[in-house]
Amino acid sequence: MMAKEEQLPAQAQVVVIGGGIVGCSVAYHLTKLGVSDVLLLERKKLTCGTTWHAAGLVGQLRATQNLTRLAQYSAELFSNLENETGRATGFKQCGSLAVANNAERFEELKRGASMAKCFGVEVEIISAAEAARMWPMMNARDLVGAVYLPHDGQTDPTDTTLALAKGAQMGGATVVEQVAVTGIHRKNERVTGVATNRGDVQAETVVNCAGMWAQQLGALCGVNVPLHAAEHFYIVTVPIDGSPTDLPVLRDPDSYTYFKAEAGAILAGFFEPNAKPWGMDGIPEDFEFGTLPEDWDHLEPVLEKMMQRVPVLEETGVHTFFNGPESFTPDDNYHLGEAPELKGFFVAAGFNSIGIVSSGGAGKVLADWIVNGHPPMDLWDVDIRRNMFFQGNRNYLRARVTEGLGLLYEMHWPFKQYRTGRGVRQSPLHARMQGQGACFGEAAGWERPNWFAPEGVTPEYEYSYGRQNWFEHSAREHRAVRENVGLFDQTSFVKFLLQGRDAVQVLNRVCGNQLDVSEGKIVYTQLLNERGGIEGDVTVTRLTGDAFFIVDSGVAQTRNYRWIRSQIRSDEHASLTDVTSAHAVLGLMGPNSRMFLQSLTSADLSNAAFPFATAREIELGYARVRAARITYVGELGWELYVPTEFAAGVYDVIEQAGREVGLAHCGYHAMNSLRIEKGYRHWGHDITDEDTPIEAGLGFAVKFSKEAHFNGRERLLRQKKAGVPKRLVTFALEDANRLLYHNEPICRDGEIVGYITSGMFGHTIGTAIGLGYVNHEDGVSADYVSAGNYELEVAGERVPARATLRPLYDPNNERTKI
């Protein structure tokens, strides 16, 4: 390390702020890519924030495919790091064991084990008796089964961090301790360097790896990094006579506890349901290798469960009661990537107690992102651009962190909703939807009706891996849309207004479809990056010659606002405005929607006067609304864009008239089941920035004939001519009693060829439907798809399925255009 009194360099290509394991990993991986001019600054000593007191668990199986790939890479890196650097890391592959004491938990573990097979993680589903033999001190009498991962392990966090720092220095990086960053320099929305207590450093790129301090560091330059510290506890026992030293890491999620062997003793760590926030008044400036007070009362309920699982601990003394702070994010996924507010400013922070296992993979992909200008894989789960503006609110963060820590070990139920930080964003129709029996879910802070409870039914979730309590209620909504008319509150849709002399030029460059259309025309298109990947899945309405109305998914608000803005060149006259809050959106969908809506307006809604994919202003109630004839459910219908202050009045007119025709209030679960029957894609699941329209079966929305050159055109032309090695395919289970959610392996002729990206029960088709990519190096054609025999693996069991490239419902697209 550089001596404290030495002068800092005046400039560096990349400045990394934070000397924990993540910051050192980023610096290490940058040097591996040939970026040697890296300066890593640590405010005190390396590892002194959270890294030093981490448990060092290296569990490879994470919640999604790509996060698992990153954890896998970390394990590989740690196993070779000592040979490369000569510095011991303490890494050992002792395996891990996750146990279940009830059938639902075992279902969760088995589904995770099935997912692991998609990307080569070795995993075994074992009996309670086998688990007991692996962990002889464990009480296994109440267990129903377990999952064993033989290549999981543990490492020494401090030694591993120092090995990464040494590896970075071997590659040319400079590591300096005792330097506090006091400001971030910027110009023209781009970072230009940092200010420190020892002078300024110019830089092309700055990386915020400041852990618990990352939020306040981001605030110095207007970057939103939502995270909050919470107290995190573990105990270390005195040595236990005869305790094996080669035990696998034991995770008992229903007891909120993990156990690992620790030099003849046992370390037991906790993820209790109601966590304790810390640092609301700021983190002390001198905080270094800091600990927090003991709190036996807080942990008492969890300690009882711990001793039931490992009874010897009831008679074993505690050598260390440890309490140290760790940072948690609103959704328990870490923050990674270039900040949408400031070019060249990257973030890797908020690791939710999985920073050690995530550090290697996160450092690698962030280094790739910095060098190549784009993420090397779909990282939407952790992309910092997923965050909403309000999530930096400290009151919100404090409320959410009380839940977030415990969620790591709670049941990961399908459709599970957060309990804390709710009611943040509400449609102007929220109270009316509540009066109709809405059970709300949360997305991007919006309270959205997911399903409607009939009279006498409480609108609350009862979770399971089977058919949940809302299944039949949502089925009724689904059928209403297919057979009559349903009403959706779609206000959470994101709405952008792009206007200016060059607006059409911008859109025709970033979109695959033709946007130079007549006024009032709606175009379905993908926003494409230079690699032909799908940055967004949108509808665009041409309002006037130089004004376009863009509608996107609610979760893409931050991401795609900044992305579209970044595509406007300095010499182009076009401006983008987020007008989401200006409009409520009501969806009237179903074969009787024309007849019903026509009874409420004097506008001509006939097919000739108001064809599919057009928008008109119409009178409705006492308001003028924009009616867009478009659908995400595969039926005749209109989305009604209503000025917010008129929304309640328009809704009341619709609701009162709807009583006579059986109008059904419908939620997002029904929308999901309807769209998946029709094969409509969902961005973030079925399509991402690493998937192309050709691979996703959306080639119809790419107009190669348009004069404008658009992003990714050459690659998409090559794919169209030569074929693609993967295709999005629709699957329907032969067994209607099984359910699909996502990440279930796709097996073709007995071999795993992909996994399900989204799944839902299709009430018209009568079975569970899944979308997922089939992969084959020599190409995936229609003939290849039809020639295979398919099974989907659900919780360890393979279930026969039929496959098709066409929608299962209305494959000729007749019902939307009647």
Image (cartoon, grey):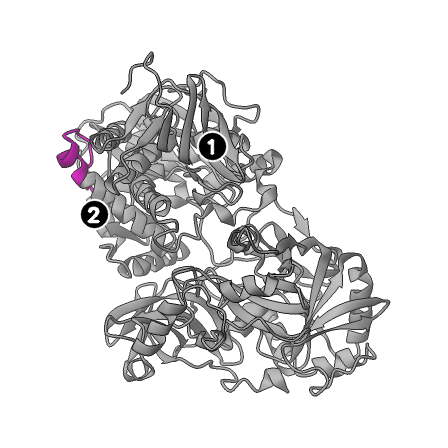
Q: Quadrant of residue 738?
A: bottom left
Q: Does the stretch in magenta take in 696?
A: no
In the image shown, does 137 or 437 lie closer to the viewer?
437
Where 651 falls versus 78 (above or below)?
below
Quadrant of the rendered image containing residue 28: top left
Image spot of residue 404 (x, y percent) = 49, 41
Which of discs 1 and 2 lies nearer the camera? The answer is 1
Examine the rendering and report whether any part of residue 410 can be seen: yes
Task: Give the quadrant of residue 238.
Answer: top left
Lateral position of residue 439 relative to residue 806, left or right? right
At mark 2, the secondary structure is loop
**Up-down relation of residue 223 to residue 530 (above or below):** above
The picture places residue 16, in percent across and down from the top left corner, at: 37, 32
Task: Residue under label 1, please give it.
Answer: 214
Type of the residue with mark 2:
His
Classify mark 1: helix, strand or loop: helix
Instruction: Locate residue 544, reporting x and y percent.
Output: 70, 68
* Upstream in sequence: badge 1 or badge 2: 2
Three-letter amino acid code at the position of disc 1: Ala
Q: Which residue is depicted at the point 47% across and 36% down? A: 191
Q: Which residues fall within the magenta stretch? A: 80-94
- Residue beneath disc 2: 151
Asked whether 91 falls inside the magenta stretch, the response is: yes
Q: Is residue 332 above or below residue 531?
A: above
- The answer to the question of whether label 1 and label 2 lie on touching residues, with beta carbons closer than 8 A, is no
Would you say 474 lies left or right of 639 here?
left
Label 1, label 2: how many angstroms apart (C-alpha)?
32 Å
